[in-house]
Image: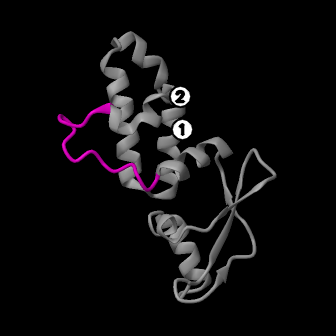
Amino acid sequence: MTICEIKLKFQNSEELVVLKDKETIKKIPLILRAINFYKADWEATDTIVEGPIEIPFPLEAGQFFFDNILKYKRPAEPLKTKISEYKEASEKSIEQLKEYMEFAEYMECDDFLRAIAFVLAKKFDKQTDAQIVPHFPAPSV
């Protein structure tokens, strides 16, 4: 079995995160493109990417993402899907969920993004417009 290592550097941490799981790598288009550029046959040969990939997000967002990327799928039937299917995300704040969505968008992981968006929408179900608006400030013109 071959090894694969990609180092990631998050904006708020000097500690490098080393991504080794090939199934995880395949689920993340941004990382997959980077490793394919580095070595096209990375799945068949040992591959250790030397320099870290800079990630413009906090480490906590990355940890949540990597802990859940393989299990969080896009809700197939949003009306029948239960928030309990995304237990870890349902325990997070609205601000954290927004950051996870931005992270997923940066990594180009649409299924993960939609899973987090589903949880966020469920959290907003219980709020009034006045409670929701402050979370999405109008852009300045």
Determine which residue is flagged by label 1. 99
User: What residue is rendered at 58% in x and 84% in y?
Assistant: 2
User: From the viewer's perspective, is residue 130 above or below residue 65?
Assistant: above
Amino acid identity at mark 2: Glu
**Which span is picked out in magenta?**
69-83
Determine which of the numbered discs, if any, sits on residue 95 in the image.
Answer: 2
Determine which of the numbered discs, if any, sits on residue 25 in the image.
Answer: none
Instruction: Give the percent coordinates (x, y) of residue 96.
Output: 54, 32
Instruction: Give the percent coordinates (x, y) of residue 29.
Output: 47, 66
Q: CA distance from mark 1 to mark 2?
A: 6 Å
Please tell me whether residue 110 belongs to the stretch shown in magenta: no
Q: Which of the 4 image quadrants contains residue 7?
A: bottom right
Judging depth in this view, the residue of 8 and 66 nearest the camera is 66
- Identify the secondary structure beneath mark 2: helix
User: What residue is rendered at 32% in x and 15% in y?
Assistant: 126
Judging depth in this view, the residue of 44 and 117 nearest the camera is 44
Side (left or right) of 109 relative to 39: left
Judging depth in this view, the residue of 34 and 25 nearest the camera is 25
User: From the viewer's perspective, is residue 33 above or below residue 100?
Assistant: below
Secondary structure mostly seen in the magenta stretch: loop
User: From the viewer's perspective, is residue 61 above or below residue 5?
Assistant: above
**Quadrant showing the N terminus:** bottom right
The local crowd at label 2, few if under 14, some if 14 to 19, many if 20 or more residues have their Cα within 10 Å, is: few
